[in-house]
Image: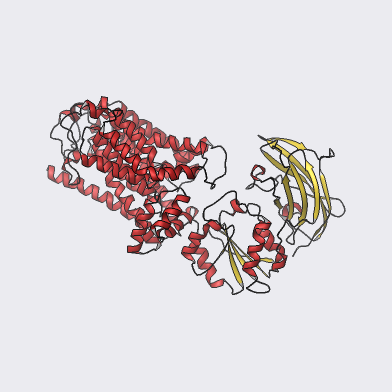
Amino acid sequence: MNVNRADRQRLALLALILLAFALRVYRLDAQSLWYDEGVTAMLGRLSPAEMVRWTAADIQPPLYYFLTAIWGRLAGWSEWSLRFVSVWWGVALVPLMTILTMHLTRRLNAGLVAGLITAIHPLLVYYSQEARMYALLTALGVIAGYCVVRLGEGRQRPALYLAYIGAAVAALYTHYFALFLLAALAIAYRLDQPSRPTKRAQSPISSLPISQSPIPKSPPSNLQSSIFNLQSPFILANLAILLLFLPWLIVMLTQLNQDASYWQGALKLGEALRKVAVSFIGGETVTERQGLWLLPLYGAITLVTGWRLWRMRSEHRTLRYGLLWLLIPTAAVLLLATFVPKFNARYVMLALPGLILLWAAGGTKIEDQKTKIEDKKLKIGDLEPAAGAESSIFNLQSLLRWGSLLVITICSLFALTNWFANPAFTKDDWRGVTEFLRPRLGEEEAIALISGHAWPVWDYYAPDLPALRLPDLRILDVNAVLDFSDTAAPLQATLDPLSERPGIWLIGWQEDVVDPTGVVPTQLTIAGKEKGLDTHYWGITLRRFSQLKTPWIPAAPPIDHALDAQFGNDLVLRGVSAIDNGDLLLFWQRVPGRNLTASAFVIGGQALDASGAVIAELPNLPPAGYHYPVHHWPDDRIAMGVIPAIQWLGPTPTPGTYSVTLRLYADQDGQRTLLTTRTGGESVTVAEIEVVIE
């Protein structure tokens, strides 16, 4: 009977592995690669030396890209093939979590529940279907964690140390945030030493063919049990890890000070914590509102499972590992983000196994300590229901256990349904854009890519369609904001050879960073006409301009009404223009050498017709729009703001002569103060603005 039960339990683990594989290959290539995955495809096809140089400039270590390069040369570079590397590691995570949990808890039911949650967790499924390094990082972290658990029990075997060193170094060369998990594991190892009992029950995984029984026969020596002893093998192992990672550590520390892919500022800690909580509940495929609705329920599950582990002395070790695994990497990533405010919830995905460990260990039946220690013959098939309170499904603890697992399962399936079927969770559709554009691109038309750093994913889908990159960047630089002088010459050089009246397609992605005020569309509107397009692609903007007179592309701010109106000691209004689509352009500049008196500014005023009647109140907008706040402006550049025609001419703009009265307010924490001009005036009026609607 035990043999049959053991076989069923092995089949259960196999079923979980197959479930994980099915979820991870289902619709694997249904969606387009997005930018980060395009970078993976580009790097995988480089030589090793070129790959290292590129990744060093982008701070990310190269191991994942090396693995992808090897796989791509064997299996090809299709979307399916590129993502399969992550599929493999995502599936491997299921037996790894099962083994880790069974070893810590000495309970096969806990291990199988951990495997189930790992198989269906939407965050893990999502990143197992993405050609990025996060599934690999998480799996390597679990391997390193398993080795530390074994070492913490006194299993001082050279093979374990070598496995730990190998997994830890591989994790660090996958993503440098692995350092925070290794710190958590080191603390757990140190706390293991004084609290480990001298007798342990035999592990249920002892009869699994994938593992040998991990139960130590004797406690470690005092020398081995001190993590602070420089002769400790664990210390020596970590010194070896540091030494092996040192070459990239130097690169990482150097690049941290040069990384310009994010705006400087303060981390919004509350917002970051919400994003982490939502991702640990529903991954990337629930809205924040849905995740916050579920947060109290998941919080209660976590508290209950943690309490159940805490109340049983025999489960304290599991509780320690779970909490340290969850909390230290998360806290460390958030702490780093307070100094380098670049954060995404996926950066703490390597902490998720700690939470799964708590849910699985505390959400399954816990035998009392006497049973766990004294039952020497506990085997993989010996999972008879224990007599007593927990043997009935109708008692409170059983209801809590089964209810918790049911909630996690239902919510995970809901999030997975969103991922597979809800178009609101579509990735940036580069494939769709290129498929639409290729048959429609005329011989006299060019393509411009804004931002230019998106070229890897563009080149993956359209290597036959060269694109002008504005700006010409390898990696996003938030300081490379486009100006009229930056873009006029490249546009003219690209368009002039095509025709006397050429056209151009604008492909926009992250244009709110590099062209936040719409300089390039403004230049093309002045030089030609925009053709309306009745098509939309998720995450990407597509615009078409034709009949361009390239000499008309302005290389300087196209100011029709020059001004020198200074408001307070903050901003100067340099001029105003109206372009042929009726939009009103405002040209601003910071007062050089002055500190801003407020954190934000907004404009106000009225538009008047030729008779002097007010036809519209100007919208209370930032001078250069929401994507380009004043504190991002260089002192030596003019920033353009755009007021759309319908917002200053009314819902049906008509040609004519108009005037505008402009005011500027300093906005400090919602308190607005009107700024006066040099002459003490409260506003500036610009008259005789000719509007021609074409």
Residue 9 placed where, x, y %? 20, 45
Q: Is residue 201 left or right of residue 315?
A: left
Q: Is residue 27 visible?
A: no
Residue for point 32% across, 31% down = 188
Quadrant where the C terminus is found in the figure: bottom right
| Rendered-image quadrant of the N terminus | top left
Res. 589 visible in picture: yes
Name the spot of residue 34 as percent of width and height, x first.
47, 56
For the image, the number of numbered tags is 0
Residue 654 left/right relative to 470:
right
Q: Position of residue 385 (x, y in %)?
A: 20, 35
Residue 59: percent from left, percent from top: 46, 47
Q: Is residue 408 left or right of residue 603?
A: left
Front residue of 412 and 627: 627
Of residues 128 and 417, the one nearer the viewer is 128
Residue furthest toward the right?
Answer: 611
- Work out whether 519 lies above or below 321: below
Which residue is more in the foreground, 401 or 166?
A: 166
Residue at image coords 45%, 50%: 56
- Residue 393, located in which quarter of the rendered image? top left
Residue appearing at x 47%, y 50% in the figure: 58
Residue toward you, 550 or 123: 550
Q: Residue at x 52, y 45 (%)?
A: 258
Colour scheme used in the picture? secondary structure
Vertical position of residue 503 compared to residue 360: above or below = below
